[in-house]
Image: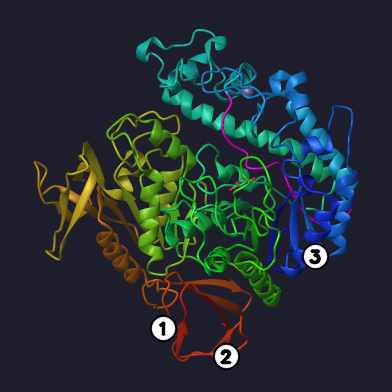
Amino acid sequence: MTAGSAKAPFLWHGGDYNPEQWSPEVWREDFRLMRKAGITAATVGVFSWVSLQPAEDRFTFEWLDHVIEGLHANGIKLILATPSAAQPAWMSQAYPEVLRSDENGIRRQHGQRVNYCPNSPDYRRFSANIARKLAERYGQHPALLLWHVSNEYGGTCTCDTCAARFRTWLQAKYGTLDALNAAWWTTFWSHTYTDWSQIMPPRQNAEFLTHGLTVDYFRFMNESQLDCYRNERDILRSITPDIPITTNLMGAYKPLDYRRWAQEMDVVSWDCYPNPNNTPSDIAFLHDLTRGLKDGQPFLLMEQTPSSQNWQEINALKRPGVLRLWSYLAVAHGADSVMYFQWRRGRGSCEKLHGAVIEHAGREDTRVFREVSALGAELQKLGDSVIGAAVEAKVGIVFDWDNWHALDSAIGPVRDKKYLETVRKHYRALYEKNIPVDIVFPDSDISRYQIVIAPMLYMLKPGFAQKIEAFVANGGVFVATFLTGLVDENDLAFENGYPGPLSRVLGIRVEEIDALYPDQSNVLVMADDSGSYTIRRLADLLHTEGAQVVATYGSDFYAGMPVLTRNTFGRGTAYYLASDPEPAFLDRLYGELLDQSGIHPVLHVPQGIEAAVRVKDDRSLLFLLNHTPNELKIDLGNEVRRDLLTGESVSGVIRLSGFSVGILEQHTSQ
Ligand code: GLA
Ligand code: ZN
């Protein structure tokens, strides 16, 4: 069960509520409308710092007392946020070093949000203090479900305070300056540091090309912001040991290594704002990534817009039914809540045109309010049948933030490495087959999987290759691609060639890497003449050292050289895919690997329907999601399942209307 669900054992329905922007009269209307919409949890306090502490020595909690009482009286649970994502102006004015510095090391002025230096002692002191006051005042409140620390940590600071802390962090990591110089390869361009004080954060008007520096600064900044979170978390935990703690993450957000964050959180939560070009597969990937952060533990969907975003170039409305569809998409992939940003649209400032459950007209006779209310009623009907249920996957796809940073800082062989895009492309091939996938990390236990795919794992951390060797030796199937195994954890190239320590299990040696212009392509030709496929972007020129050649390049001076190899290693096999193929090839490759491994789709469904499963005790919950606007038929076979949304028993051929959803329960012990 998700941490926190003991007090509220159902799928939470709610979202960000900013009563500090409104009068008590509006609050009363909010409570009435929340009840009507089936809202069960409200996130309060995000960005309310100046309303709670208008001056350094003055606190004004009374309004919050009333709001919390009002929510409680109306049966709405509380997710209480600490307000530390935006410091009040008085603080920036009196303690200017709380302000963040920009990419040139120049201190920013007060304003916007997340504009604090994560290493500022004053910021740490004030944020700890307000967290303590909130915990002391509301920690015992019966409505309190969860602490929501700050909001969307992120970005970076390059100020002198951070520079000094960075040096201390480096001293602890490397011990000596010689060791640091060696790890960062600083004899290049005469960059050798001769005194610790010469080390500066990467700044755009100074040094930012030393890869050891940039990857270490990313790690340091990640830890610095995590320290801010831990600073508040530890106080909350000491005062309210039974209240779980989270902070809202942002999916595949590059500046922070969420795998490390998740280890410090009781429950992972995230804010889902798809880009206009994201497909359901892309969104599902982010849910799976988030679920993977705590090794499969269900997560909270903390924010999504009920209708439109406002910060994209063009902000389309979610079509009728899509809010519900995407809410269940999240639930199908492991979410134990459905929540929104925001409850009520503010009248001013930069989010006044962001979608909300209650729009400026304040009415309940709107499409959005009706859709939210209908969903609220449905979630209540589902009760505790879904929460805590697991997703069981036999395929893992490796994702790594350090690798992402290292790849993007590498200059050559192409500028845009497209790491996230490539991982998502491999994911999509499995998603479209309705194969559950876990996103895993270099430190994950992979022994439970049958297939592990590691696209573009350019940086190999110590121990990873041994883990893969053991996995394959035990019968696992491993797939690696181009740009794998070039550098170690310090971003230093492996001395014995690519793919570094993975060479043995893959049975190959890469000699050169070709980069193709956007209008160029090559061909992957199956060695058994069973087909050929277009390949683009990058092409490793490799030699087998024990592996068999499955496919070769069809043209150019390396025609006939291997482009896909298979190595038998112990009881398993390891594949190396040396170029970026058209989707049809991944569809074929994974189709064959799944067949050989005996892994079957959740259900055979028409294209456009997604079938996903969560498992709880002896029951499996089949989610059928129609991502198309058209009615489609699905053959359930002879087995009888109970439709949790209608209560009816179903089997055989059923119809699912456009953008609609079915949740079918089946007892697995029968
Ligand atoms: C984020 C923030 C919210 C709000 C929304 C708008 O997720 O957490 O405060 O700004 O974006 O989409
Ligand atoms: Zn700083």
Residue 466, above or below 173: below
Residue at far top of view: 194
The quarter of the rendered structure image containing the C terminus is: bottom right
Q: Which residue is mark 2?
A: 649
Residue type highlighted by circle 2: Ser
Task: Name the residue rendered at 22%, 47% in the picture.
Answer: 536
Residue 531's x, y, as percent?
15, 63
Prevalent SS, magenta region: loop
Between residue 306 and residue 595, name the one nearer to us: 306
Residue 577's x, y, as percent?
27, 51
Crowd class of label 1 (few under 14; some 14 to 19; many from 20; radius 10 Å): some
Q: Is mark 2 within 8 Å of ligand 1?
A: no
Residue type highlighted by circle 3: Arg
Label pair 3/1, CB-CB below 8 angstroms: no
Residue 62, above or below 383: above
Membership of 547 in magenta stretch: no
Residue at mark 3 to residue at mark 1: CA–CA distance = 40 Å
Q: Secondary structure at mark 1?
A: strand
Q: Secondary structure at mark 2?
A: strand
Residue 329's x, y, as percent?
53, 65
The magenta region covers 140-157
Task: Name the residue rendered at 46%, 51% in the picture.
Answer: 275
Tally the marks.
3
Tell me the colour scheme of the image. rainbow
Residue type highlighted by circle 1: Lys
Q: Is residue 461 visible?
A: no
Q: Which residue is mark 3?
A: 32
Residue 179, above or below 607: above
Q: Which residue is mark 1?
A: 633
